[in-house]
Amino acid sequence: MLECTVRWHHHGMSFIAETGTGHMVAMDGAPEAGGHNLAPRPMEMLLAGAGGCTSFDVISILKKGRQDIRDCSVKLTAERADEDPKVFTRIDMHFVVTGRGLKPEAVERAIKLSAGKYCSATIMLGKTAAITHTWEIVEV
């Protein structure tokens, strides 16, 4: 079971989340909503979590496949519904995978496995959002 406690920071719309593993993360609202723009918005954190989750999978799958991966980044851009609840309606993910002699079919397979089987975060978000995946390989 995962745990997280989120506490209001008592000024504006700032919050501190403490995870079950003892890590702290700050969040803040937009100034027009009473925040002070001191930390990421909660929905940005959700998007960042999805990026971390899928990156974890892709790197793990490529390493297990004995691919010489040196770096991996994913840029996520998201659109939200205009009306409440303002859920994500579209998320585009672009992976840049860096390594030596990486096989394109292995990179594509890793991304597909993450998207369709392993990444809990993006699979959940996919219930409301159309998610696209693009990728490129950088040779070092």
Image (spheres, grey):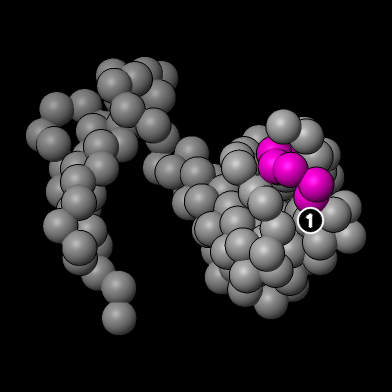
Up the image or down, 140 lies above or below 5; here it is: above
Residue position for label 1: 107
Of all residues shown, which one is farthest toward the left?
A: 10
Of all residues shown, which one is farthest toward the bottom?
A: 1
* Image coordinates for residue 15, horizontal then vertical, percent: 22, 40
Looking at the rendered structure, the secondary structure element under dot 1 is helix
User: What's the residue at 20%, 65% (across, down)?
Assistant: 20
Front position in the image: 25 or 14:
25
* Residue type, mark 1 in image: Val
121 to the left or right of 103: left
* Image coordinates for residue 41, horizontal then vertical, percent: 41, 35
Q: Is residue 132 shown to the viewer in this render?
A: no
User: What's the residue at 60%, 57% (across, down)?
Assistant: 59
Quadrant of the drawing holding the N terminus = bottom left
26 to the left or right of 43: left
* Image coordinates for residue 94, horizontal then vertical, percent: 75, 40
Q: Callout 1: few (<14), some (14-19), or many (20+) C-alpha neighbours within 10 Å? A: many
User: What's the residue at 39%, 32% (across, down)?
Assistant: 40
Question: Which stretch is magenta?
Answer: 96-102
90 to the left or right of 30: right
Q: In terms of secondary structure, what is the magenta stretch mainly?
A: strand
Front position in the image: 3 or 55:
55
Up the image or down, 16 lies above or below 36; here it is: below
Quadrant of the drawing holding the C terminus = top right
User: What's the residue at 61%, 62% (across, down)?
Assistant: 63
Query: Is residue 78 a member of the stretch shown in magenta?
Result: no
Front position in the image: 92 or 69:
69
